[in-house]
Image: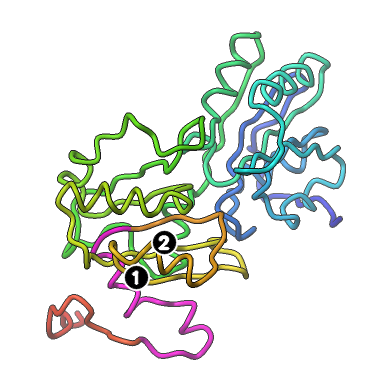
């Protein structure tokens, strides 16, 4: 492991014994970690981390004991209750505890449940937001979450509930009508059902979609497809979670904005994918 990192300035929060900081580690790329999270890594003596936290990030806490608490669909893992109570136990023992969660702890990360358990047991907390995959993953795929020629709303949806099924409480009719761009977390295994629900709610079969796996990491893959073909194309490509799905015309912007392709020397496929015509004049 590497050395801990010293941050400039002296006005950074102090992680006190008996406290738990719930920090977002971002969507994968260690460079997307916040400075507050980096500050926490340098102080904690216990780091409880999730499956999607990059090893390089863990290397910034050489002084800490690293405790794995990953939860992955279809694989044996610790229960949420056990994880929450472990945080309570460590804090009450006087440790400086960092709970490191992929993405943002309060966006489909169950950080709210963990924070509530800690507060109910009298454990003080600090919450450090992180870049969520629905924002960072789209950006690394060259897809803007919002674009004024495409959408004035974006909806984030979870693709499965506590039972592992697509949530029965989701109002797909309202989601389909109310949001031009829909981003679905943890929904790849249910892509067929999600696509059917959206098409039954009025979304076009040929609406552009993207599937982004292992977002922002060197393993990232991006599949461009349509709503009707999405499930079959996922199977044909052999894609595996973790993944986010994006439904909407914003996906077309990847033809112009695939900046990782540009880094690799690949020219944009279409500088004007929305057909707006001439670019704005430079001032």
Q: Quadrant of residue 83?
A: top right
Could you tell me how far apart the alpha carbons at marks 2 and 1 are, in whole angstroms? 15 Å
Quadrant location of the N terminus in the rendered image: bottom right
Q: Number of marks in the image? A: 2
Q: Is residue 50 left or right of residue 176?
A: right
Using a 10 Å C-alpha cutoff, classify the residue at mark 1 as few (fewer than 14 neighbours), some (14 to 19) or many (20 or more): many
* Extent of the magenta region: 247-268
Identify which residue is drawn at 82% across, 40% down.
66
Between 188 and 8, the residue placed more toward the observer is 188
Image coordinates of residue 67 in percent, x first then y, are 80, 37
Outermost residue on the left side: it is 277
Residue 243 left/right relative to 87: left
Give me the residue at 77% from left, 43% from top: 42
* Residue 238 rendering spot, x and y as whole percentages: 54, 68
- Residue 237 lies, in percent from the top left, at 50, 72
Q: Is residue 116 above or below residue 247?
A: above
**Disc 2 and disc 1 in contact, CB within 8 angstroms:** no
Q: Quadrant of the C terminus?
A: bottom left
Q: What label sits on residue 225 in the rendered view?
A: 1
Q: Is residue 238 magenta?
A: no
Vertical order, 43 against 103 (above or below): above
Camera-side mark, 2 or 1: 1
Give the structural element (helix, strand or loop) at label 1. Answer: strand
């Amino acid at each position: 492991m590497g050395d801990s990192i010293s941050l400039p300035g002296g006005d950074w929060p102090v992680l006190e014994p008996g406290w738990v900081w719930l920090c977002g580690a971002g969507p994968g790329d260690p460079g997307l970690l916040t400075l507050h999270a980096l500050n926490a890594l340098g102080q904690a003596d216990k780091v409880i981390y999730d499956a999607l936290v990059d090893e390089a990030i863990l290397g910034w806490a050489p002084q800490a004991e690293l405790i794995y608490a990953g939860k992955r669909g279809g694989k044996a893992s610790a229960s949420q209750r056990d994880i929450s109570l472990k945080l309570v136990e460590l804090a009450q023992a006087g440790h400086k505890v960092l709970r490191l969660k992929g993405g943002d702890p309060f966006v489909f990360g169950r950080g709210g449940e963990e924070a509530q358990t800690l507060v109910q047991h009298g454990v003080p907390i600090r919450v450090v937001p992180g870049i969520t995959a629905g924002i960072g993953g789209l950006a690394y795929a060259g897809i803007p979450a919002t674009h004024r020629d495409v959408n004035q709303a974006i909806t984030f949806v979870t693709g499965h509930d506590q039972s592992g099924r697509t949530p029965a409480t989701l109002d797909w009719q309202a989601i389909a009508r109310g949001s031009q761009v829909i981003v679905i977390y943890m929904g790849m295994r249910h892509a067929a059902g999600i696509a059917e629900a959206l098409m039954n709610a009025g979304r076009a079969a040929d609406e552009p979609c993207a599937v982004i796996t292992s977002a922002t990491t060197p393993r990232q893959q991006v599949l461009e497809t349509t709503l009707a073909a999405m499930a079959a194309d996922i199977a044909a490509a052999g894609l595996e979670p973790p993944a986010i799905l994006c439904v909407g015309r914003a996906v077309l912007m990847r033809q112009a904005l695939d900046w990782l392709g540009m880094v690799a020397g690949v020219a944009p496929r279409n500088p004007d994918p929305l057909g707006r015509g001439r670019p704005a004049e430079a001032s």
